[in-house]
Image (cartoon, coloured by chain):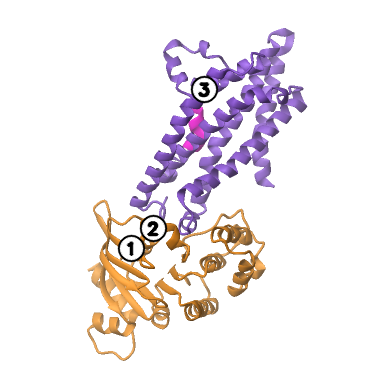
Amino acid sequence: MLVEITHLTKTFGNFKAVDDVSFGVGEGEIVGILGPSGAGKSTTIHMILGLISPTAGEVRIFGMPFEGNRERILEKVSFSAPYVAFPGRLTVFENLMVFARLYNVPSSKIEELLSLFFIRDLRNTRVARLSSGENTRVGLCKAFMNDPKLLLVDEPTAYLDPQIASQVKQVFLGLQQRCGTAILYTSHNMAEVETMCDRVIFLNRGRVIANGSPIEITQRILNENRDEPALEEVFLRVAREQSN
Amino acid sequence: MGRLAEMLYWPVQNIVVWGFFTIYLSRDNHLKPSLASFLLGAAILWGMFYAFQRDLAAGFLEELWSRNLINLFSTPLSVSEYLAGLVAVNLMKAAAGLLAAALAAWLFYAWNIFPKFGALLPFVLNLGLFALAIGIVITGLIVRYTTRIQALAWSFAGLLMPFSCVFYPLSSLPAPLRPIALLLPTTHSFEGMRQALGGGGVSGIDFARGFALNVIYFAFAIFFFHLMFQSARVRGLLVKPE
């Protein structure tokens, strides 16, 4: 397993954001983490990245415990989310150059990524002038800078128009097939998760309530025999039960 | 361009104001030439000290405001490397500001600090080290207590100023305040500066006292920053700092 999460728990005061979560992610696997708001998806991802310390449990990546191997692990891990941004005073290229230096990759890689995400014309534009969708694509350029073996993406297509979102998904799939990159993926777009993910981990109130392929999750939570995955219905069912 | 102007504008403006003040005090020989020299020297060095500690914390605040912290700390960048980068950039900015202020004093008021700079260098070093320690402590506090306390970046040095004997000698402070002043490397630096500008040479004792205090404060600052950073990780403040 590329990622092994065992009994991961996080409490903030009296609130248990993540409660005894265990799962693994294999090489080249695309795994979706789903759940209503406050289910613990982002907190789990942030703990995998070491941005939040777990209250209990362990994160192992590439067979190494995260604590004590942070730098070695993060050389081959990357992250993208629409709620992170870049200093607005710098241009797209200048911002990406910071990360190219951090990952020790040549600047030609930036040009390649700008083309890959269709923002070559924004190269010298200040980040403050970008739209949300353009900012998301700069974030994706940063996320692909180090050719990650593990990519964590939190709502990667949230602000993208359908055409760009579709192209971005193709880039993800290409990376997975070409480099065997494992992708841990959160999204509120259930159709996207159904088509992209080999496996889905469904979280609710910080706990894993189901772990399996989209069709297995659908059958288990809806308790019906279905031929097609219906994660939208699953999501609505879980959200309704949570609000009751 | 905006950054460059920002970096140079305040040091120059500070010297212009203090220059006019010394001209006013010098009229009719109200002010001894050495006092004018002390005032301008103090204005330049305090400006450098203030800017260095402020810009360290403000540099971190910029990452926070631009929501770039997650980007940075999800790379192999270590906390120590991040701090070293922050220090290196702001050291260059402080040096540029110091140079601009010194040139302004020379051009506008014919007061040339450069021939005395060798004698002032030990005290500039001590001021820089103390600014660094304070900047790191304030940055640590902002990491832990977030933007709620961001005003400290601009205001903290002001709290130290009355005790630092920037524009007056230690002997003019009320006796009960002197022990506090002696705990500050700034006090020893400005005492040493006055001796150097007055032609008394480098005060080894002022340098040594300031440096010894700096070693303690700097070690504490590094320890404190790591403590605050760990605490922020536990509380999830690196991802939700507002």
Q: Nearer the viewer, mark 2 or mark 3?
A: 3
Indicate the chain coloured purple by its letter.
Answer: B
Chain of the residue where label 2 is placed in the rendered structure: A
The answer to whether the residue labelled 1 contacts the one labelled 3, judged by CB atoms less than 8 Å apart, is: no
Residue span colored magenta: B152-159
Q: Residue type at mark 2?
A: Gly
- Residue at the disc numbered 1: A59
Inter-mark Cα distance, 2 to 3:
41 Å
x and y percentages locating residue A21 in the rendered image: 27, 66
- Residue at the disc numbered 2: A50
Is B122 above or below relative to B175? Answer: below
The answer to whether the residue labelled 2 contacts the one labelled 1, judged by CB atoms less than 8 Å apart, is: yes
Tell me which residue sits at (58%, 64%) in the image: A105
Q: Main secondary structure of the magenta part?
A: helix
Indicate the chain coloured orange by its letter.
Answer: A
Tell me which residue sits at (50%, 33%) in the image: B155
Q: Residue type at mark 3?
A: Ala
- Residue at the disc numbered 3: B208
Q: Quadrant of residue B93?
A: top right
Inter-mark Cα distance, 1 to 3:
48 Å
Residue B3 in magenta stretch = no
Residue B154 in magenta stretch = yes
Asked if labels 2 and 1 share a chain, the reply is yes
Q: Secondary structure at mark 3?
A: helix
